[in-house]
Image: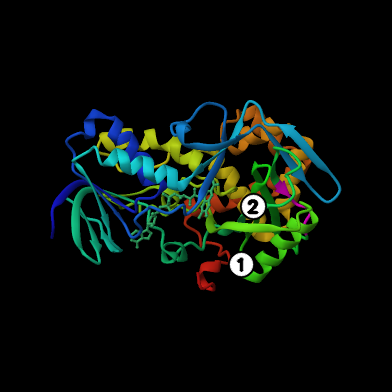
């Protein structure tokens, strides 16, 4: 076994590096030995994170592009609105990695290792990270490595996927305006929930992304055909050059991946439940969670997310979606049609008051929530009384992902 560390980050992605930045700000960690292990060297722009917030954020200097207006489109209506007090922002992962790694270079107590993690062992007195180049031990391991096998065990709560493919395009015809298309549901829904998302970076450059909230996956051809058709028919563009392609699958579940018996291994990021289960947005929630995680780590505790009523709402929505994927379209479209966009964005950021929650959950598009609430209460009771658990279809068991 090689050197012992105070902390090992298993996976050096967005959550790990966000928490590490707070550690580098805090004198408490100055003399702590920290190891980051990742299979990737984190030099590529492997994704772009978008989110909305009303104040400048911790990584404000990295914001690549900001927007103040958004639109929602459906077959028979469209609505454009100002998103004040929010600003919609995008950060390129490569800028984020570069900034964090240049800070790491100034800290002798932090080391980065490029290696494939094969196993993480929890223990009473220390945890151990095994890699293809050696094994490393630590007082605490912060684990953000999600493997399909982690999700295979989830069959008592619904599990859907936000899966998407997007083109970063250079286009011949100028974009009509500087408004983001948050969700365009006017494309065929095919008994599921799917929409187009458009971010105009400037007049001749944009991201066009085709997104599904579903238990099923689609072929590359399906994405490509739909994206091409959308660019032609909806954006009115004939000629374009694809500069980059973005693809992803984000698990949508409220299941906890945390092992309650864990002594020395903490799950962070998507693995720690930081991803908003009903939308897939993660960046903003990681930034909110990072300081909470840091204060728990300083107290020697295994960081964990505090329970929140928003998790129950997400569980409800996923329960409804698992039974009827088309409901997602009706809900999101209906909420933006009947409620103020500010209220919807506040609710989705988990910053609404109880009164505001009530305005959302009692709106007509959200009525199936109430039926789902009854099912959820039943499920929670069954859990408490340890009755047999209801099984939900789990696509990880049948997909090749
Ligand atoms: C293409 C894409 C676009 C997204 N866009 C948005 C967005 O716009 N807004 C938003 O809020 N969220 C977005 N998300 C969701 C979410 O924010 C990201 O997935 C985010 O990176 C999650 O942070 P994380 O730290 O949990 O995981 P990651 O950032 O993925 O970090 C996990 C790390 O573990 C490493 N790893 C995995 N397996 C191993 C192994 N065996 N050994 C060693 N290292 C390993 C990976 O290389 C990675 O660096 C997007 C996701 C994707 C995939």
**Residue 194 quadrant:** bottom right
Outermost residue, right side: 76
Dot 1 and dot 2 residues touching (CB under 8 Å): no
Q: Position of residue 24 (x, y in %)?
A: 28, 34
Task: Tell me the number on the disc at residue 170.
Answer: 2
**Residue 82 quadrant:** top right
Magenta segment: 183-187
Q: Residue at x 23, y 29 (%)?
A: 27
Q: Position of residue 380 (x, y in %)?
A: 53, 50
Mark 1 packing: few (<14 Cα in 10 Å), some, or many (20+)?
Answer: some
Outermost residue, front side: 172
Q: Position of residue 287 (x, y in %)?
A: 44, 37
Task: Pick whichever of labels 1 and 2 is earlier in the sequence.
Answer: 2
Could you tell me which quadrant the N terminus lies in?
bottom left
Task: Tell me the number on the disc at residue 217.
Answer: 1
Classify mark 1: helix, strand or loop: loop
Q: Residue at x 69, y 46 (%)?
A: 369
Q: Position of residue 103 (x, y in %)?
A: 30, 38
Q: Residue at x 50, y 69 (%)?
A: 401
Q: Nearer the viewer, mark 1 or mark 2?
A: 2
Q: Would you place residue 77 above or below residue 391 in this image?
A: above
**Can residue 303 be seen from the camera position used here?**
no
> Is 271 on the left or on the right of 121, as rendered?
right
Q: Would you place residue 247 above or below residue 61 in this image?
A: below
Classify mark 2: helix, strand or loop: strand
Way the structure is coloured: rainbow
> Is 324 on the left or on the right of 66, as rendered?
right
Magenta stretch prevailing secondary structure: loop
Q: Residue at x 30, y 43 (%)?
A: 302
Separation of disc 1 and disc 2 at Cα?
A: 28 Å
Q: Would you place residue 344 above or below residue 47 in this image?
A: above
């Amino acid at each position: 076994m090689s050197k012992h560390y105070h902390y090992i980050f298993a996976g050096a992605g967005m959550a790990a590096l966000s928490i590490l930045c707070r550690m580098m700000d805090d004198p408490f960690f100055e003399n702590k030995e920290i190891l980051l292990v990742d299979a990737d060297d984190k030099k590529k722009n492997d994704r772009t994170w978008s989110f909305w917030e009303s104040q400048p954020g911790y990584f404000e200097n990295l914001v690549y592009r900001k927007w103040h207006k958004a639109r929602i489109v459906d077959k028979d209506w469209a609505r454009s609105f100002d998103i004040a007090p929010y600003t919609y922002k995008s950060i390129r992962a490569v800028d984020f990695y570069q900034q964090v790694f240049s800070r790491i270079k100034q800290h002798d107590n932090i080391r980065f290792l490029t290696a494939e993690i094969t196993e993480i062992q929890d223990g009473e007195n220390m945890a151990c990270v095994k890699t293809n180049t050696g094994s490393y031990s630590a007082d605490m391991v912060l684990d953000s490595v999600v493997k399909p096998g982690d999700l295979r065990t989830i069959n008592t709560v619904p599990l859907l996927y936000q899966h998407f493919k997007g083109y970063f395009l250079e286009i011949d015809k100028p974009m009509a305006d500087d408004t983001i298309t948050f969700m365009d549901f006017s494309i065929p829904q095919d008994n599921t929930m799917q929409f187009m998302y458009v971010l105009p970076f400037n007049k001749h450059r944009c991201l066009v992304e085709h997104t599904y909230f579903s238990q099923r996956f689609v072929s590359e051809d399906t994405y490509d055909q739909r994206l091409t058709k959308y660019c032609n028919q909806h954006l009115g563009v004939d000629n374009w050059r694809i500069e980059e392609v973005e693809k992803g699958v984000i698990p949508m579940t409220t299941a906890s991946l945390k092992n309650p018996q864990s002594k020395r291994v903490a799950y962070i990021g998507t693995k720690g439940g930081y991803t908003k289960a009903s939308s897939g947005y993660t960046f903003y929630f990681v930034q909110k969670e990072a300081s909470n995680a840091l204060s728990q780590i300083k107290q020697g505790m295994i960081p964990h997310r505090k329970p929140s009523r928003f998790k129950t709402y997400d569980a409800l929505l996923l329960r409804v979606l698992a039974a009827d994927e088309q409901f997602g379209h009706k809900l999101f479209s209906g909420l933006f049609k009947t409620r103020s966009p500010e209220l919807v964005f506040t609710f989705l950021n988990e910053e609404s008051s109880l009164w505001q929650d009530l305005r959302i959950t009692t709106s007509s598009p959200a009525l199936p929530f109430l039926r789902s609430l009854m099912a959820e209460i039943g499920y929670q009771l069954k859990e408490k009384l340890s009755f047999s658990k209801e099984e939900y279809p789990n696509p990880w068991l049948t997909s090749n992902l």
